[in-house]
Image: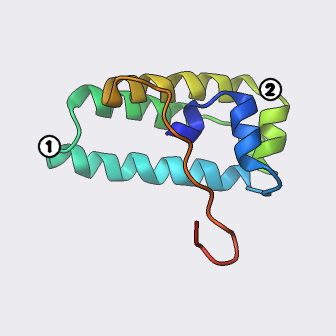
Amino acid sequence: MTLLAAGPQDQLAWLGERELETASIVEEVELLCRVAEGLAERGVLEPQELLDLRAVGRRIGHIDTTCRTGLWGDALAAADPAWGEIRLLARQFLLTTLGDWRQPMPRPVHPHTGHR
């Protein structure tokens, strides 16, 4: 969520030279949303946190299939309004969950080794 909530320039800087497919980002968020349902059932997530996360999942689920193809950096550089909406929803989730949407960016995983 931190990566989705970050500004476009920070997202592009995080990507650097990585060629991350947009479909991979969408799949990761959809997986997170499915896992969150189970966490909410166990009381790990508060109801509002789950509602905020569902909103992110719904919006990312409505991204047109043509926008899911290609590299995420290209989609961000094209300033597709969908990513701006997702960014705002991710920020809301982090505000609800952590009290501030500005969080340290995740450390990138090296594609060949899986190590950080």
Q: Of label 2 and label 1, which has the lower sequence position? A: 1
The quarter of the displayed image where residue 59 is located: top right
Identify which amino acid the numbered label 1 is placed on: Gly
Identify which amino acid the numbered label 2 is placed on: Ala
User: Residue at 50% across / 28% down in the picture?
Assistant: 102
Image disc number at residue 79: 2
Q: Secondary structure at mark 2?
A: loop
Drawn side of residue 17 relative to residue 86, left or right: right
Distance (Cα) linking label 2 and label 1: 37 Å
x%, y% of residue 66?
Answer: 78, 43
| Residue holding disc 1 | 43
Q: Secondary structure at mark 1?
A: loop
Of residues 57 and 17, the one drawn nearer to the viewer in this rendering: 17
Decide: few, some or many residues near mark 1? Use Cα within 10 Å; few <14, some 14-19, many ≥20: few
x%, y% of residue 80?
Answer: 77, 27
User: Residue at 70% across / 34% down in the picture?
Assistant: 10
Q: Is residue 71 above or below residue 47?
A: below
Instruction: Confirm whether residue 61 shows in the render.
Output: no
